[in-house]
Image: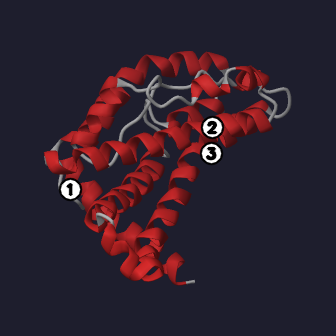
Amino acid sequence: MLLYFHLETLLPRLCAFLVAMALHDAAHLGAAWLLGNRAFKRGMAAAINPLGRLDTLGLAMTLFGPYGWSKPLPIEASQFLRWPRLANTLVYAAGPLMNVFLGIVFWWLNFTLPETFGARMETLDVEMWRVYLQYAVIVNVMLGLIHFLPLYPLDGWAIWKGFLSPGKQRKLAQYERHALVLVLFLMITPVGQWLLSHGYPYVAQVIMYLYSL
């Protein structure tokens, strides 16, 4: 894992996070529109503005690792005309899946660009681009995996709630604050950092396998 709390890497980390979250939310909204949620068709351009959707606490998590979150999208299963629970699941799964896909793309670029451009890259700040691409890979892959956890405010929480009745959803909402504490524990404390850092090498092996195909 790359190191954090280093000011010299702050810019590429923030850029990687903003790009990842903008496309993460765009995937949510695109899936919602394709599945018949017309409420998002009207306000899609404004909703995917990454600066307008920043969550202070979610952004602060980028100081501790390659993860974070933006403000939750007000997607409700009742807004879908057909198969509302399945549509809700697909919409919330679209964001993390987009990040996993982007992680694979950035991994490919990290290995391919030097071979493709060769000497022409000498005129560019190659190290800057390498650092950005490395963070883009890690941020996107970890965002994709972490957001499948069934914990508030992650997408896995919304996927899980989508299968419950309205009454059970209201009851479950009482525990959102506790789930947020658990998420912060995973992202900030040494124990959580250790678990995440030891899980990433296995993810990297899978990406390397996909890259070799």
Please state if 98 lies on the left or on the right of 145 as rendered.
Answer: right
Q: Is residue 135 above or below residue 150?
A: below
For disc 2, the marked residue is 28
Which of pointers 1 and 2 lies earlier in the amino acid sequence?
A: 2
Number of marks drawn: 3
Q: Is residue 53 above or below residue 63?
A: above
Q: Is residue 5 above or below residue 122?
A: above
Q: Quadrant of the C terminus?
A: bottom right
Residue visible at 66% across and 38% down?
Answer: 91
Q: Could you say whether the residue bearing mark 2 is in a helix, strand or loop?
A: helix
Please say whether residue 9 is visible from this viewpoint.
yes
Q: Is residue 75 above or below residue 142?
A: above
Instruction: List the single residue furthest toward the right.
Output: 82
For disc 1, the marked residue is 194
Q: Are marks 1 and 2 in contact (CB under 8 Å)?
A: no
Q: Quadrant of the N terminus?
A: bottom left
Residue visible at 70% across and 38% down?
Answer: 30
